[in-house]
């Protein structure tokens, strides 16, 4: 992607609007910010090389989000949709002439949460983009956008990161020293750096393995586990964004585990699970019909949606623990 963008920028073919899609933790936001920095950097070669100097006032201002030609918006805390007013403000920002740099750059995070009204408020900007403007929307999938938005943006799909890239990162940022341990965490990360980083916390990994193993127990106590889930989520910090992120991480583990049970039922293998977790998935695969596993999977995805939609976390987690407990009970 970096190479492709380098060619596009140096040949002057940069589009006005991009939609970055892909799973969490694969670098979409980082890429968008680095692109902005390179375009606004005061070093003469930065844009063509797509390599910001990270030292000039412009780079520092973008990094601190105080550059007059750069803005980043996202879902406001406690809102469940991006409000129209925010989009109007964003469109106004883009319409102004660059104050210091050669571009006006806007990043819209959490684009999955654009309301239809907010998306429509964006259409005019997308149809007649102001000169020297760059808008990047960041979301998980084009399916989460109105077709009118997708057709006016260039869609850039970010793939899960290769395991060796993840392992190299975990080592270079000092999270782990042992290459074998880094490789193991990279495998568990399933292509997401943020997930591999989270699992580098031994407590969290231990919790995950115990939880998934216990789900396969005939006497799984869903009330007790609901309490433990809430505790882990609240341990992520006081801010609700951190708690939601942790809840999504846990739900991701569950989704992957149920999917693994289905894969095992079909004769596939599941290298992304710890050995004890894979045994538990095998137990479920042997014990339950595919319909039950699918129902539990669907319920887990629904819970992910609830968390995204800002349903109260404790309620969402308790309801999920109860439902999966029942669905995974011996048939
Ligand atoms: Zn710079």
Image (spheres, rainbow, N blue to C red):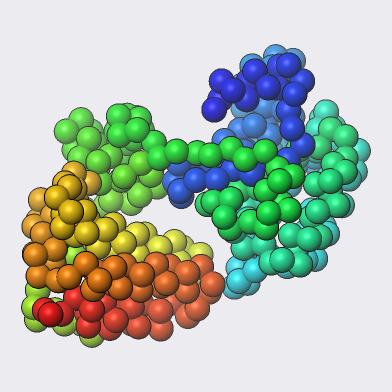
The answer to whether residue 159 shows anywhere in this view is yes
- Residue 215 is drawn in which quadrant? bottom left
Residue that appears at 73% across and 16% down: 11
- Whether residue 234 is visible: no
Question: In what quadrant of the picture does the N terminus appear?
Answer: top right
Question: Where in the figure is residue 292, as x and y percent of width and height?
Answer: 23, 73
Q: Position of residue 282 (x, y in %)?
A: 10, 59
Seen in the picture, residue 296 relative to 252 is either above or below; the reply is: below
Figure check: 198 above or below 81? above
- The quarter in which the C terminus is drawn is bottom left
In-image side of 159 versus 290 (left or right)? right
Residue at (84, 32) in percent of width and height: 132
Is 109 situated left or right of 122 in this image? left
Residue 269: x %, y % from top left: 16, 46
Residue with the most extreme right position:
97
Give x and y (percent) for residue 319.
35, 83
* Residue 266, quarter of the rendered image: bottom left
**Residue located 63% across and 56% down the image:** 145
The structure residue drawn at horizontal position 78% and vertical position 60%, both measured from the top left corner, is 120
């Amino acid at each position: 992607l970096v190479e492709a963008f380098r060619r596009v920028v140096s040949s002057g073919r940069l589009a006005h609007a991009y939609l970055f899609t892909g799973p969490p933790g694969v670098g979409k936001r980082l890429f968008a910010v680095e692109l902005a920095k390179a375009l606004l950097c005061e070093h003469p070669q930065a844009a063509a090389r797509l390599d910001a100097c990270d030292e000039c006032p412009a780079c520092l201002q973008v990094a601190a989000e105080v550059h007059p030609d750069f803005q980043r918006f996202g879902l406001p805390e406690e809102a469940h949709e991006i409000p129209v007013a925010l989009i109007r403000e964003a469109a106004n920002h883009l319409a102004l002439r660059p104050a210091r740099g050669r571009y006006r750059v806007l990043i819209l995070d959490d684009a999955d949460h654009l309301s239809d009204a907010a998306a429509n408020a964006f259409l005019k900007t997308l149809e007649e983009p102001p000169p020297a403007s760059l808008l990047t929307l960041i979301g998980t999938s084009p399916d989460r956008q109105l077709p009118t938005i997708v057709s006016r943006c260039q869609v850039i799909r970010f793939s899960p990161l290769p395991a060796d890239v993840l392992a190299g990162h975990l080592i270079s940022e000092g999270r782990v020293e042992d290459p074998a341990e880094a490789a193991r965490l990279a495998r568990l990360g399933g292509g997401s750096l943020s997930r591999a980083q989270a699992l580098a916390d031994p407590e969290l990994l231990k919790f995950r393995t115990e939880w998934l193993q216990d789900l396969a127990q005939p006497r799984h106590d869903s009330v007790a586990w609901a309490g433990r889930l809430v505790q882990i989520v609240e341990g992520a910090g006081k801010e609700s964004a951190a708690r939601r992120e942790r809840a999504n991480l846990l739900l991701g583990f569950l989704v992957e585990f149920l999917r693994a049970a289905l894969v095992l039922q079909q004769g596939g293998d599941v290298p992304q699970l710890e050995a004890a977790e894979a045994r538990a998935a095998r137990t479920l695969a042997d014990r339950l019909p595919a319909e039950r596993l699918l129902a539990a999977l669907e319920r887990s995805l629904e819970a992910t949606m609830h968390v995204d939609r800002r349903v109260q976390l404790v309620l969402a987690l308790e309801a999920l623990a109860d439902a999966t407990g029942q669905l995974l009970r011996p048939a």
